[in-house]
Image (spheres, grey):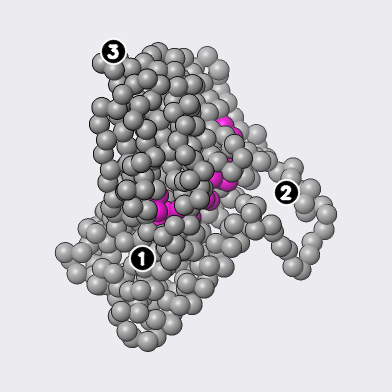
Amino acid sequence: MGLIDRVKNILLKPKDEWAVIEGETSSTADLLGGYVAPLAGIAALCGFIGSSIVGTSLPFVGTYRTPIFWGMGIAVLTFAMAFVSVFIVSFIIDMLAPTFGAQKNSAQAMKVAVYAYTPGWLAGVFNIIPLLGILGIIAGLYGIYLLYLGLPRLMKNPAEKSIGYTAVVVICTIVVSVILSMIVGAVSMLGGGGMMGAMGRGQSSAVTFDKDSPAGQLEGFGKKMEEVNRKMEAAQKSGDPGKQAAAAMEGLGAVLGGGKRYEPVALDLLKPLLPESVAGLPRKGQSAERGGVPGLEMSKAQSEYGDGSGKNVRLEVTDTGGAAGLMGLAGWAMVQSEKEDDRRIERTRKEGDRLVHEKISKTGGENEFSVIVGNRFMVEAHGRGVSIDVLKGAVAALDLRKLESMKEAGAK
């Protein structure tokens, strides 16, 4: 079937088209070269036109255009990340199959991932006019609907488990997409100078990276994923559903936990970290919760403080648990940034090994201050009627070193 017909059918009559796709024997090369490449290429090209040629009009600033060279580099990287996304999502779909009573089939999982991305790539056309990029959200929602229809048809999960299967795949995909977007943003901000300089120093048949560097972390993450994939293949060949389910859970841990599975720490360990008062404001209430889906469990404790005069503070400590590995990737991918308008100031920066984010209201609204500790725990302070310095002091007064010492707690 031709590209245009396939796109038209998967968008306009998806139920019928999934039935057709189910019986096709398309190779991965055919899917990537004949479908992903042209659609992702159009999206990347439109993004380049919108950012570097049309530009974005900003009040009191004028029209901003990304420099042509940088724009081309971002377009190429965005195009490449489309292939990375498809592979990762197909891996997640196949990995989770036994958990939701579906059949593991990497070829079918690849087809589900590829065709579910169709609306998102087509929505890339809106990037020609950057302010219309918000329409991509609608396309994303339709992509979720396509995924919901495609999973039971191609992966053979029971109908009653389709919602859960779809939800977990979407959660994982969102997290992965955020990380890939931050990587694109980080590389674009770094520019081409450093990379060109590295190329000028010559090539080596064996390139190594410091294990704590961004490239080193990605390299290590990739090796762990390869190891998990081998285990999953062995489990699939064994025919043992129990082993397949265990391998799937380990794989989910690899995607979200950076190669490990993390059980979130007990609530009794988080609650004592929150003080009885903050800057003279007594505690008015405290709550804690722990939950999630297998492989993506988290725990959180929070306290609220106030004196009845309009001064209120909320402190939260969250153990990201299963997503700890991706929090680590986010820690280095989130380069320093700062933006300001007539309502607020927002900053993101690294302080040592910690990622810090602050939002300061200029209109008397809510101020926020947060820090990621140990690439796993998120400590947040939100306040009204108090300054950002009060929130910073509240976070600094917590036992952050104790949190850092627990970063490997519950690792499996």
For label 1, the SS is helix
Give the residue number, with chain letter if any, for mark 1.
93
User: Marks 2 and 3, Cα distance to the nearest angstrom?
Assistant: 55 Å
Q: For the residue marked with disc 2, what is the amino acid?
A: Met
Which residue appears farthest toward the left when viewing the image?
160
Q: Earlier in the sequence, mark 1 or mark 2?
A: 1
Query: Mark 3 is on which residue type?
Result: Ser
On residue 309, the disc is 3
Q: Residues within 10 Å of mark 3 (few under 14, many from 20)?
A: few
Foreground residue among 92 and 59: 92
Q: Position of residue 259 (x, y in %)?
A: 49, 64
Q: Where on the picture, by quarter, is residue 292?
A: bottom left
Q: Dot 1 surroundings within 10 Å: few (below 14), some, or many (20 or more)?
A: many
Residue 172 seen in this snapshot: no
What is the C-alpha distance between the residues marked 1 and 2? 34 Å
Quarter in which the N terminus is drawn: bottom left
Which residue is located at x 44 percent, y 18 percent?
387
Which residue reaches farthest bottom? Answer: 238
Compare residues 163 and 252 and report the one nearer the observer: 252
Q: Is residue 9 above or below residue 107?
A: above
